[in-house]
Amino acid sequence: MNENSYDDIKKAVDQLLKINSTVKRKKKAYIDKQKDLFIGIITALHAVQTRTALSQAELKLDFSSYDEMFLQIIDSLILLHFGKEGYELISWYLYEKTNPDGTVNELQDDDESIVPSDTAEDIWNILVKLKANNEI
């Protein structure tokens, strides 16, 4: 939202309530910034994986040896930040959730209920729960 939009909102509130109001934009909480950053990173990694698969299938170009070092660095940073369980979850989402034939694997909890894991946001939510359970 730009500054003019805030002015328009302020004017509308002032006229409606017949007061002199102030409109401030609430800053994102640190955890929300982390979530947005995580979703962006995972979405980009997924796009890189898709690009690699398409270039191999359609163009017969294999950049896997070129990409491998970068992916190893990223994997190591994920392991460093999220620990073994988080790393395994993220790796599963990126590399094993969708099979080569297009079928999709699902996550199940201890009660064998399917856990939502279709988006990077779903994975973030699972990671938050894992962290909360491990801090107890």
Image (cartoon, rainbow, N blue to C red):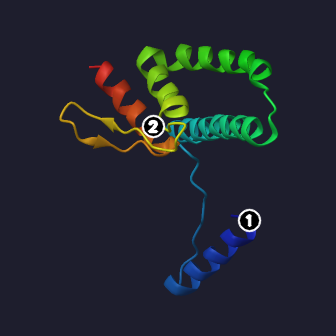
Q: Residue 53 at x, y = what percent?
A: 69, 36
Quadrant hosting residue 1: bottom right
Q: Label 2's element?
A: helix
Q: Residue 14 at x, y = what percent?
A: 57, 80
**Residue 55's disc number:** none
| 116 left or right of 60 in image | left
Residue at 52% x, 86% y: name it: 16
| 113 left or right of 5 in image | left
**Which of the two labelled residues, at mark 2 and mark 1, occupies the earlier sequence position?**
1
Could you say which is closer to the camera, residue 45 or residue 11? 45
**Residue 123's disc number:** 2
**Residue 3's disc number:** 1
Residue at 37% x, 25% y: name it: 131
Quadrant hosting residue 70: top right
| 18 left or right of 85 in image | right
Q: Residue 7 at x, y = what percent?
A: 69, 73
Q: Is residue 69 above or below residue 93?
A: above
Residue at 57% x, 86% y: name it: 15
Residue at 32% x, 19% y: name it: 134
Circle 1: residue type: Glu
Q: Quadrant of the C terminus?
A: top left
Circle 2: residue type: Ile
Crowd band around label 2 with a 10 angstrom C-alpha radius: few (<14), some (14–19), many (20+): many
